[in-house]
């Protein structure tokens, strides 16, 4: 079996025949889960177990679980607050650590190795669309402190994190899901502000997600960072980061409109991405895997870059396993996860500043205290 550098999304809550074929014949490096894949605790645990069982080599399972508006577990656990909320109440560092522990504990129970979080983008005066309330602060020190606390909380439970979105899209003009987002600042400004949390937390995290922002004062104004060697390789490695570079979803319009899957996958690889995510159209994966395998065979430069990416991916695998070894066993039952989440939510509410609401925040969050009560951004 040839090593793989792709991360793929699944179509639904159970594996299709095509997905089983892909996993068994040429297992991707990673599988990323979304809300469409999650219905119940039992179903999610079974899905992850089957993915690993049918694969020649179990892929790393990944998910975006930040809390707030990006909460893939919202149908399973009581509502988790957004990153921005931690700067609005008491005990921000303590609460950030605890949120990381709660999320890490939940993902460990489901045998999910990697949380594609925390966001370490630095919020501007007005957060761009797509980043609303997902950032920890408006200055590098606050972001480093709170995102670092969150990261260490997850690590303590045996779950790896991933810093995003390199090299910082907090001053972006738009949501990269739907088109280009422009960060019109100089390299010096970027280095003195947006890059600092990546630089200070990168070694600890061992993985960084490459965003799709464009930086016209630094590179080609039409070239997203994920396809830019200057941004993804030269600048990223300049901060002495030797971990794995994971692309943001290559099916976002900020990058997907620039070529075929095959073209943008090769460009992303050669730019310096070590793991390349395609999160929606799994039916295109066999052809894409065949294309990359052929390019590795026929082009020495592609082969060299591929081998480097595979080596970084293997080191990150080892990092994930070390975290698990140190953390010890996973939670015994999902009720253990729920109980800890409820304890966190109660304490979190006690740290919130007083606000007059037509429905008190605590009532909206608590509800009947049963699985299925969900967290939404407006509750934080």
Image (cartoon, rainbow, N blue to C red):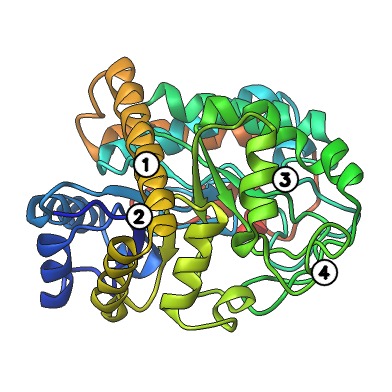
Q: Secondary structure at mark 2?
A: loop
**10 Å crowding of disc 4: few (<14), some (14-19), many (20+):** some
Camera sees residue 103? yes
Residue 309 position in % (x across, y down): 41, 46
**10 Å crowding of disc 3: few (<14), some (14-19), many (20+):** some
3D distance between C-alphas at marks 2 and 3: 33 Å
Q: Are marks 2 and 1 in contact (CB under 8 Å)?
A: yes
- Mark 2 — residue? 5
3D distance between C-alphas at marks 2 and 1: 8 Å
Q: Is residue 85 left or right of residue 69?
A: right
Q: Nearer the viewer, mark 2 or mark 4?
A: 2
Counting the numbered discs, the total is 4
Mark closest to the chain's N terminus, 2 or 3: 2
Residue 36 position in % (x across, y down): 35, 70
Mark closest to the chain's N terminus, 1 or 4: 4
Q: Name the residue at 31% across, 66% down.
A: 298
Residue 306, above or below 244: below
Q: Nearer the viewer, mark 2 or mark 3?
A: 2
Q: Secondary structure at mark 1?
A: helix
- Mark 3 — residue? 84
- Mark 1 — residue? 313
């Amino acid at each position: 079996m040839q090593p793989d550098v792709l991360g793929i999304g699944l179509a639904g809550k159970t594996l299709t025949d095509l997905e089983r074929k892909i996993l068994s014949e040429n297992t991707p490096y990673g599988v990323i889960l979304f809300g469409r894949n999650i219905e119940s605790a039992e179903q999610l645990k079974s899905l992850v177990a089957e993915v690993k069982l049918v694969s020649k080599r179990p892929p790393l399972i990944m998910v975006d679980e930040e809390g707030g508006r990006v909460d893939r577990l919202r149908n399973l656990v009581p509502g988790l607050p957004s990153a921005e909320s931690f700067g609005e109440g008491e005990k921000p560092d303590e609460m950030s650590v605890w949120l990381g522990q709660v999320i890490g504990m939940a993902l460990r129970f489901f045998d999910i190795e990697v949380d594609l979080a925390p966001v370490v983008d630095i919020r501007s005066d007005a957060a761009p669309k797509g980043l609303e309330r997902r950032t920890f602060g408006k200055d590098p020190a606050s972001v480093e402190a709170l995102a670092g606390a969150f990261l260490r909380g997850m690590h303590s439970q045996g779950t790896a994190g991933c810093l995003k979105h390199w090299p910082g899209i907090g001053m972006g003009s738009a949501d990269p899901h739907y088109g280009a987002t422009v960060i019109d600042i100089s390299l010096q400004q970027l280095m003195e502000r947006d890059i600092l949390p990546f630089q200070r937390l990168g070694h600890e995290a061992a993985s960084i997600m490459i965003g799709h922002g464009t930086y016209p004062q630094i590179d080609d104004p039409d070239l997203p960072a994920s396809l830019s060697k200057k941004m993804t390789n030269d600048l990223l490695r300049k901060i002495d980061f030797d971990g794995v570079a994971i692309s943001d979803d290559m099916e976002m319009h900020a990058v997907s409109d620039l070529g075929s899957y095959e073209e943008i996958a090769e460009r992303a690889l050669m730019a310096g991405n070590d793991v390349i995510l395609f999160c929606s159209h799994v039916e295109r994966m066999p052809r894409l895997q065949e294309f990359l395998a052929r390019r590795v065979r026929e082009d020495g430069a592609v082969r060299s870059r591929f081998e480097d990416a595979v080596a970084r991916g293997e080191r990150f695998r080892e990092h994930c396993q070390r975290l698990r070894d140190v953390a010890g066993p996973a939670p015994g039952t999902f009720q253990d996860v729920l109980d800890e989440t409820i304890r966190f939510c109660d304490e979190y509410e006690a740290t919130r500043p007083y606000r007059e609401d037509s429905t008190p925040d605590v009532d909206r969050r608590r509800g009947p205290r049963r699985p299925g009560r969900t967290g939404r951004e407006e509750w934080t």
